Every structure is written in C-alpha cells, then in structure tokens.
Image: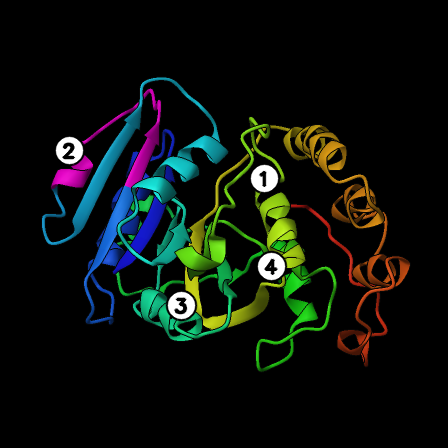
Amino acid sequence: MISVIIPVYNQYSSLDVVLWHFCRQTILEPFEIIIVDDGSSDYDPSVLERYTSLQITHIRNKINKGRSHTRNAAIDSAKGEYLIFCDCDRFPVPEFIESHINLIDSPDAILSIGYSTETYNSVDKLKVEAETIIRRKAIYYKVISQIYNESGITDSHLCWLSTLSGNMALKKSTLAGHRFDCDFKNWGFEHFELGYRLWKDKTLFMSNAKAENIHIAHARSKGFYNESIINSHDTFLSKHPVDEVSLLKGFVLGEISLQEYETKINGGLKWMENKQKPILVNNINV
C-alpha cells in the first residue's frame, strides 16, 4: 500500500488544488492520502468531501502542535509501506506517485528526493493540466540539486540538505524508528535534522527528476526566514554539535558556498568537478 502524507494549516484553497491533481495520477495501484489538520482557524472539511474518488484519512489536531508532530501523526496512521510526503500547497504532476514508487521499490534503503518547482499563478487558475502551468525550479532546490548527477546519484556528505519534506518518499522500513523531532516547534530545520539521522544510518539519497510537485508561491513577512533559520539552527546544533551542522547556518544565509561547505567537512569531491562558480543560497526558501 502507498500512503501520501499531507499536513495542512490554514491553506484549504491550496489543498483543494492539490487534491484535484491527486485525482489525476497515472499510478494504477491504490493509494491513501492522510491529511492532518494542525489546528487551522479556517478549517474546512467540505474541501475533502469533494474528492470521493480518493481514499482520504482525516486527522485533526484541536490545537496547533507544529509540523513535526503533525507529520509524525500521519506516519503513525499510515497503512502503507511506501510513504510519500507532500505539502498542502504543492500539487503533483500526473507521474508524481508512480515516479517515487519506481525509485524506492528496491531492496536498498532509498530516500527519493523529488523535483521541486514553483508557480506564481493564482490558486483559482491551477485546476488545469500540470504541463500547461508556467513554473520555475524552486530557489533552494536549484542550489542543492547540483550535488546530484544526471542519474540522481551523489557522493556529497551534504546530501541530507536535500531532505525536503514537501516532496520526498521512502519505505516505512527505511524510516524505521526515526520521526521528525518535535523540539522544532515552528518553521525550521526538522526535515534536515531527520535527513541527517537517515544519512548517518546509511540511507541512500537519490534525486528523482520525474517526481515533480509544484509549489504555490506565497509571501512571508519580512525577516521571517532569517529569524527562523537562527532559532532552528540553535536547536539542530544542540542535538548534533558537529561541523556539518555548525556550518549550516552560514550556508543557508548565503555566507558560504556549497563547495566551501563540502570542503570544510572533508566531504565528497566528485560532484564538484566542473563547478567552478560558487553555488550560493540567496532569497532562501526551504
């Protein structure tokens, strides 16, 4: 069985679009969608009721508990061995589920990192075929995807930085006892921290260019990312006081390049061949 995990908080108009596109998946195998509402003030279950063709399990937190707790609740409720993570503001192309499953259906412990793009179209214009929608490669994904070759393979010791919980997949047996750390209360690095632990457990990180979902871009308040990065990095570093984590803040704030980061931790070097121009994060959006 396949379980698609979608947390939602105050974005039901976007969720409507996401579910519309999940009705158009190419995969023939059955799949469930687990939607966990994290105490939304605009809670609207009627959106879910429109999609009777989908097998939806709906969980609601009475109060806001944060992204880690919400995704963990979905993981623990999942019936499937195959877990696919999507967000309520990221709608899938038709091959999304099928492409993730094709990669992780392996005896190896694989984390499939999907292809992340974004659109600035208004929500009411997105219930159309995905191939017709104008979008661009997401800013952060454009940076971190450069560690992977055309076959989706990397020797980078920073592959855990591609753990993007809005578009990834793995088997439940690969996740094993790992969960998102609930000490990360707000927007932050809980996905990177989970990825770091999976990497330490020898999980194989692979890029999956066919598993695309499209982010519905929305504005954040001024200074939101910088403040969140600093607070979240402190939490991450307190749990893993090592160079790989210590240098993370400088990287995501655009102070050091991806190549410099890799070199400082004595990581993999092959991916950096023929990449002379510094790869820097700007206008961060992870």
- Which residue in the protein does label 2 denote? 46
At label 1, which amino acid type do we have? Glu
Q: Quadrant location of the N terminus?
A: bottom left
* Structural distance between the alpha carbons of marks 2 and 4: 33 Å
Please report the bounds of the magenta region as a residue range. 35-49
User: Which element carries disc 4, helix, strand or loop?
Assistant: helix
Q: Which mark is residue 141?
A: 4
Is 186 left or right of 23, judged from the image as shown?
right
137 is higher (above) or lower (below) than 16: below
The quadrant where residue 137 appears:
bottom right
Tell me the residue at 77%/45% (across/down).
245
Task: Bin the neighbour count of mark 2 within 10 Å (Cα to Cα): few under 14, some 14-19, many 20 and up.
Answer: few
Q: Which mark is residue 100?
A: 3
Q: Confirm or deny contact between disc 3 and disc 2 (CB under 8 A).
A: no
Give the label, 2 or 1, closer to the camera.
1
At label 2, which amino acid type do we have? Ser
The quadrant where residue 142 appears:
bottom right
